[in-house]
Image (tube, rainbow, N blue to C red):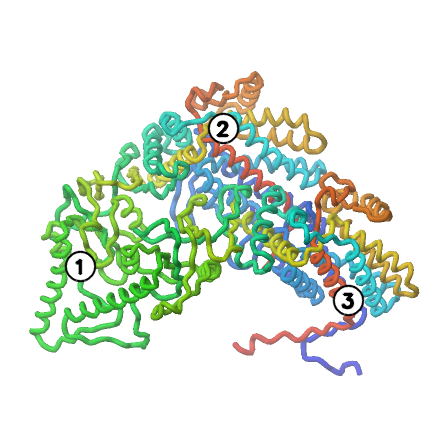
Amino acid sequence: MAATAVQAPRSGKTESYVDNKRKDDIRMANIKAARSVADAVRTSLGPKGMDKMISTASGEVIITNDGATILNKMEVLQPAAKMLVELSKSQDVVAGDGTTTVVVIAGAFLKQCQTLLHAGIHPTVVSDSIYKVSLKSVEVLTAMAVPVELSDRDSLVKSASTSLNSKVVSQYSSLLAPIAVDSVLSVVDPAKPDLVDLRDVKIVKKLGGTVDDTELVKGLVFDKKVSHAAGGPTRVENAKIAVIQFQISPPKTDIEQSIVVSDYTQMDRILKEERNYILSMIKKIKATGCNVLLIQKSILRDAVTDLSLHYLAKAKILVVKDVERDDIEFITKTLNCLPIANIEHFRAEKLGYADVVEEVSLGDGKIVKITGIKDMGRTTTVLVRGSNQLVLDEAERSLHDALCVVRCLVNKRFLIAGGGAPEIELSRQLGAWSKVLQGMEGFCVKSFAEALEVVPYTLAENAGLNPITIVTELRNRHAQGELNAGINVRKGQITNILEENVVQPLLVSTSAITLAAECVRMILKIDDIVTVR
Amino acid sequence: MAGEKLFKDEATEEKGERARMASFVGAMAIADLVKTTLGPKGMDKILQSTGRGHSVTVTNDGATILKSLHIDNPAAKVLIDISKVQDDEVGDGTTSVVVLAGELLREAEKLVGSKIHPMTIISGYRMAAECARRALLDRVKDNKDDAEKFRSDLMRIAMTTLSSKILSQDKEHFAKLAVDAVMKLKGSTNLESIQIIKKAGGSLKDSFLDEGFILDKKIGLGQPKRIENANILVANTAMDTDKVKIYGARVRVDSMAKVAQIEGAEKEKMREKVQKIIGHGINCFVNRQLIYNFPEELFADAGILAIEHADFDGIERLALVTGGEIASTFDNPESVKLGHCKLIEEIMIGEDKLIHFSGVEMGQACTIVLRGASFHVLDEAERSLHDALCVLSQTVNDSRVLLGGGWPEMVMAKAVDELARKTPGKKSHAIEAFSRALVAIPTTIADNAGLDSAELVAQLRAEHHKEDSNAGIDVITGSLGDMSELGISEAFKVKQAVLLSATEAAEMILRVDEIITCAPRRREDRM
């Protein structure tokens, strides 16, 4: 595995000075380590890329195709290799997709750097050329891009499915892509049309069924059971929902207390008091007309007791307990209600209203669905199903990528062709540009232009095609002015990729190039590894 | 006499020649280590921690590298100290000062080799340093009276400082950020009111300067997300029930109703506290500790924006910039100083939501939001920006400016050379050596850029033989250039500090003739 290959060179603890002679070696060692990381994820690029199985230290097994996830779990030690892992993470933050591409491009750049450094070119010159390449690339890519409107749902779905096509769940892309598009579009705030907070899209995973059963829920879904004690209702129509942050259980003070019981009659009385206490609370709740209670989890004391559940059931109130505090914000936003932290503040205006709250059996488990919410906030829930935990997790990751892709389009409304078309076009235009440049820079730019061919090359290779024929043909088509010619992996040939509906957001491509360039430049500038405290 | 033991076991003593050699070697090793980071084309280092997590830092900042080294050699420690002092005093030139001190010692070593007494060398160095300082003073420019020119001076200094750092590609952008931020300070060197927030994602170019203050926290549930003309109460108080702190205190009751009463009383206490806080006439409450659900709801009902769990640094700064005080008791609202700002709103940077306070009381406060590919980049960017801010704030006070790119060193070297010729006696050797050490700085800059240093420095020296030359090394084109045209400037204060502290450090190490290593304290004793 790469992780073992990139073990850091251990040096003595008091080492403080490294001879100058070693400096080239350090740079080379860094480049090598980083490249081996890039090679490790290379095969997972593209629609026919392979998956990796990762078994973590805790014995858990993950199967994924997502570059960021693979790298994250790899636990590399070598500092330069770590930087590549970081690089992939940043791409995840910025664009959410293209996490493999960015690492593969960085690896290809580094490979060219090796040759250039061997030719005796100063690292700073190489680094400056990379910077120029990245600036020029953004220019070229922007020129290639096609603007897209948010109302053009088709284009959005296309780009989401391009992202999904390279994942394990690719056969479901026709189902998941529209879900991703719809859920993002539904959370866009008209007041701030450029911003999407993906936290407003909640993904609930539930084992069982197949990915086919994944659905978009206009409302709320809890992966929880309705509390069944004493036969409370499991379906409520015209629900009035309260989100409470207090507990319906016998009182407990912060100061330590004990109840002194001295005789038998007192015991009876205390039990009765307890019952009355709870009953009075429930009466107050009932008085507002509330019929669904969402109760926040409490660590200090029981949120509900059997007794209170019993009374709640009697009052025909549906109870969902153990709601996490972190979810409260999402829930209140969705239900358009306010959390209630004290029984005294239990008032009707703080409730949320929905048409139906029901418990649905799914496979062996049950979930609670709230639909038809009145004045629903700008949030969405996606219920993901899968036949086993591995598929489920991967489906969630893929869906997240697809959501990010749509988000990118909302931020920057341009599309660009996929299938290696932008990279080969970049390579061609940069190659032409390098001829105008003078001196070392021209030479460097030329080699980086070649390096970009790695993306179509790898795509073809992973798809089992002959990479050399494909890349040369691709180059040929682009030279003839077919801007959007790309590899059609399904057909195994070169076609106009825009017509094949393989599109991706511009932001993914541009940030991949700029981030890769930034990272490679940093690695190049390092001439020493110093061990410190 | 031999055999008579003077020191404890394991304590060692090194004398005369050997001691001097040891300190020379140590100091020079340190200088050589950071030498490659000097100048616009200097390289970076990876600092790999041997501690937990093997965290990795990538940096070009001399002070940061030296600070984190394991060093055993006492002389090397002296150099690290001067680099630290340089960092504290002026913020930049941390590498230059170490390289210069190293070169001075290298020259001194040769002189000692040719039987010149260290004291002679020291007095020669002193004369040379004084003469160099005067030479610089003769050539400084001061544009304090001309606001327009002064600003362009600041821009130039910022760009020169940044050009050797990671921010070099976007130096204009960042120079503008830094200058704007420092100009807001209006002469104070208190960099605390400039807040730097790092957010991963985006690229360095997306970094921006924001007037006002940004707090990386969330607004409580159901509370207003936007407040105009806010009165802010900054507090550090526990917002749960007041606990009885005596251990083992407990209440005995004989019925459930009484427990409920106590619980109610606890709640009531909390409500009282909240009412007291609300009674201050505020519409924003920032607490360092947690605000629990119950008070949060009370605040929401009162339409007050409550922010819980702000970090300590955050609330101190917030109190500073909004002109408030951190309160912990709320009994007399008159004595509590509230903070004010024009607008509080939620903004989104990258994927995160932050709270933005604008139009704050203290006009000089501002926030710089850094964006970058990874946290390595962000950390390094912060260090670089901090250097630039330090230098700028110093320059605002002492507006004397010099050219950069090896120009000051050549000016000094020329003056020192002339002094050497005029000085009779052995001292003149030392003075000459000082001039050679100064020339080593442009040499290193050229070397790091992969240029032919011998050729360039010789050309530079010839150029400087003319009166009033502005020649320096233009690293970008790899030739000599007119520094005033290229806009490469440095602050006089930085150069002066480099010169004086390097000389002092060299002098201190030269004086050493004996190193006594004390016996290590025994650890086993305690076991």
- Farthest residue to the top: give it: A480
Say whether residue A71 is left or right of residue B190: left
Query: Residue at point 51% right, 36% down?
Result: A511
Labels 2 and 1 in the same subunit: yes
Residue under label 2, please give it. Answer: A459
| Mark 2: secondary structure | helix
Q: CA distance from mark 1 to mark 3?
A: 79 Å
The foreground one among B144 and B128 is B144
The foreground one among B309 and B22 is B309
Decide: is A396 above or below A141.
below
Residue under label 1, please give it. Answer: A305
Indicate the amino acid at tag 1. Thr
Q: Position of residue B228 (x, y in %)?
A: 38, 51
The label on residue B507 is 3
| Mark 1: secondary structure | loop
Q: Position of residue B143 (x, y in %)?
A: 70, 52
Indicate the amino acid at tag 2. Leu
> Which of disc 1 and disc 2 is earlier in sequence?
1
Q: Chain of mark 2?
A: A
- Farthest residue to the front: give it: B145
Q: CA distance from mark 2 to mark 3?
A: 64 Å
| Mark toward the viewer: 2 or 3 | 3
Badge 1 crowding class, 10 Å Cα cut-off, few under 14, some 14 to 19, many 20 or more, is: some
